[in-house]
Image (cartoon, rainbow, N blue to C red):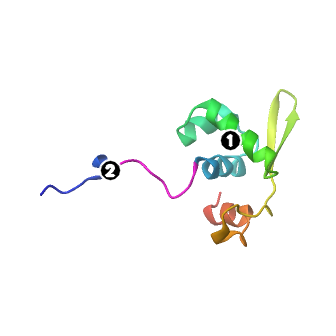
Amino acid sequence: MATKTLADSPMWSYLTNHAFVLLCLFRNPDVRLREVALTVGVTERAVQRIVSELEADGVLTRTRVGRRNTYTIAMDSPFRCGLVKDRTVGELLQFLGK
């Protein structure tokens, strides 16, 4: 029987694309969404949708500064999942670091 390699396994992650987008915006609040898309490995449209969802949920605020946007994360936003609903988005971002 052959040994499985990482190349043979389907790609998955412990974190969602929402978490990766938040982490990018936490590290650089002035980053362009095109750069976030390249970093996360999704389309720019997917990042725009994620940012819109995070804004609608009150986790993220977008502010226009000149021709660019800057993003502010509501660090005290609770997780949506019942298993960790007593934890905040800020705790995750602080853990993952800059």
Relative side of 66 to 41, left or right: right
Q: Quadrant of the N terminus?
A: bottom left
Of 65 and 52, the residue lying toward us: 52
Of 5 and 32, the residue lying toward us: 5
Of 20 and 27, the residue lying toward us: 20
Q: Is residue 43 above or below residue 74?
A: above
**Label 1 sits on residue:** 50
Relative side of 51 to 39, left or right: right
By secondary structure, the bulk of the magenta-drawn segment is best described as loop
- What stretch of residues is rendered in magenta? 9-16
Q: Position of residue 25 (x, y in %)?
A: 71, 47
The quarter holding residue 43 reads top right
Q: Amino acid at mark 1?
A: Ile
Q: Residue at x 65, y 46 (%)?
A: 21
**Label 2 sits on residue:** 9
Number of the label disc, if any, that sits on residue 28: none
